[in-house]
Each structure stands twice: as structure tokens, then as C-alpha cells.
Image: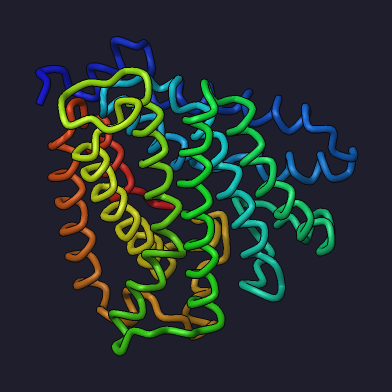
Amino acid sequence: MSGISGTQMAERQGVTDEAMIASVEPVLASFVRSVGLPRNLREAVEYALLEGGKRLRPLLSMHSAIAVGGTADDALPAAAAVEMIHAFSLVHDDLPALDNDDLRRGRPTVHKAHGEAMAILVGDGLMSIAFQLICERSSDAGLAGQLCAELAQGTTRMIAGQVLDTLGGHDAATDVERLRETHRQKTGALIVAACRMGAIAGMWRHGGRGGRGANGVREDDLLAVTRYGNAVGLMFQLVDDLLDVEQSTEQLGKRSGKDAEAGKLTYPVVMGVEASRMEAARLLEEARSSAQRLECGAGLIDLAEAMARRDR
């Protein structure tokens, strides 16, 4: 490992988490305006995409780029595209046919604000625009192709996880196995994609330590980033399940207790609250261990710890 931490590398680049988020916002806004959407669709897309949100997945992409010796800017197209896919998933998840939510980020969901038909089309549009952004904004065609492949796989797995969560179809035998199978896909797959896309973008031009494949992509580092993403993806959902039973609707900015009302499998229901907390701590340690294998992984460690502490 290098003597420079991920946090120090980010500081040398003049990049904080706040600056990273600020760099993504104009990319999202300008690209949506550039693709020639009808005004009513554009306004609904902007409502879904630009108003609030933690921007966790863009941060994971940019910190993953830094962790392997690249820069946050290397990951900007990946970061923006993965946030568009995340926004699409929330718009569709909130629809009456799925989770039937009226509140998201403390305000009406897209189908409540713009109508159900428009919400369906907003989600469809965000999915296609995400891939268009990668193709138009990546530094070269080879990188764009690899990023599109990673994002497509993550999106497909995310949709499969939503099916398992709402419609069933599990192969797993026990409740714990079914829960993990669901959330490795529904929540974890896009988080893993965000991490891998950022790492690939960071390694593409900058190379680094040995063991490189084509275009400087190092399989050992990509494996460490993937393990990190798998750990924080499950941990994120586990913390989300705990917040759903422990926090109020006002604190969360979305309806609390809805999973229990729907009879869904959640970590507190299957494992109990204390065991769920212990599992979250174990996953955090797994994420730390994976990030420590990277050249400049301290920023990813800081981000994992913030995810474990979150209260909304």
C-alpha cells in the first residue's frame, strides 16, 4: 500500500465529499437539459433527479477511482450515470403497483406530483439517459463500453432483486438466505456497480501497481473494490431496515414502518434488532479490510463508517 491515504489523496486533489457532490450536480442538470426532452417530461425528470438525495453512489464511484490511484473527475460520467439509474429505481419503486409510497425525501413522490403515467416514463427516460451519458461523456469508447456493461449488469440485478422483494421467486431455502439473496441484488448490485465503475475509470488511464489487464485495469484491485461494494451494499440495506423500525417518518423523509406493514422480510424481523446491529458491524469491518488492500482506500473506509452511522 502507498503511504498516501485516500483522504490525503482527495485533499491533494482539492476534493472533499461536498466538492464531489457539487461536481456531479451540474453534470446531471446539464445533461438532462441537453437531450431534448419535452418540457413536461424534463421537469418531472428534474424533480426526480435533482432535488435532494445523499448522492451516495456517486461518492462511492469517485472514492473508488481515488482508491486505485485515479482522480474523482475520472469517475464523473460513471457517478452521474449510476445516480440516474438509482433515481429511476426510486421513481418506479414508489409506484402504486410496487411499494405504493406517497413520500420521498420529505416531499410527494413523482407519481403524486406529476401523475402515474409520467412517473413511469420518467423512470424509463432516466434509464436510457444514463447509458447515453456514459457514451457521450466518457474519455474513450473502450472505457464507455466497459462502464455500460457494468451498469447494465448492476441494473438488471437490481430489477431482479425488486422482483424477489415484491413478487417472490426465491431459490433460497431459509428466510435469512432469501433476505440476503434479495438485497444483494435489489440494493447491493447498484452499489457494487458504482464502486467497480469508479475503479475502472480511475485505473483506465492512470495504471498503477502490477497485475494489470487491458488499459491498466488491475484485477486484484477490482476484486478488493468488489468485495468492499458487496459488504457496504448489504450493510446499507441492513441499516435502512433498522431505521425503518427505529425512526419516524419525519426523521426519515419517507414513510417509516412500511416494510412491516407489507409483511416483507427485513433484517430486524428475521434476525432481531441486536443481531442486525452485530451483522452491520461485521459488514463494516469486512468493508474496512477490503479497502485497506487498496492503494489509497482510506476515503472508502470513511464513507463506509458514515454509512453505518447514518440516521436517515
At 53% from the left and 56% from the top, the residue drawn is 155
Q: Nearer the viewer, residue 79 or 253?
A: 79
Q: Position of residue 290 (x, y in %)?
A: 17, 44
Q: Quadrant of residue 94?
A: bottom right
Residue farthest bottom in this picture: 173
Q: Position of residue 35 (x, y in %)?
A: 78, 32
Residue farthest front in this picture: 214
At 24% from the left and 69% from the top, the residue drawn is 276
Regarding residue 169, the answer to whether it shows in the image is yes
Regarding residue 251, the answer to whether it shows in the image is no
Q: Quadrant of residue 255?
A: bottom right
Taking the image as shown, residue 24 lies to the left or right of residue 178, namely: right
Q: Position of residue 226 (x, y in %)?
A: 28, 48
Examine the rendered structure and indicate whether residue 198 appears above or below residue 30. below
Examine the rendered structure and indicate whether residue 14 appears above or below residue 166. above
Taking the image as shown, residue 237 lies to the left or right of residue 278, namely: right
Q: How many marks?
A: 0
Q: Nearer the viewer, residue 212 or 93?
A: 212
Q: Position of residue 286 (x, y in %)?
A: 16, 52
At 59% from the left and 28% from the top, the residue drawn is 25
At 51% from the left and 67% from the top, the residue drawn is 256
Q: How is the image coloured?
A: rainbow
In which quadrant is the N terminus drawn? top left
Taking the image as shown, residue 306 lies to the left or right of residue 275, namely: right
Taking the image as shown, residue 34 lies to the left or right of residue 146, namely: right
Q: Quadrant of residue 5?
A: top left
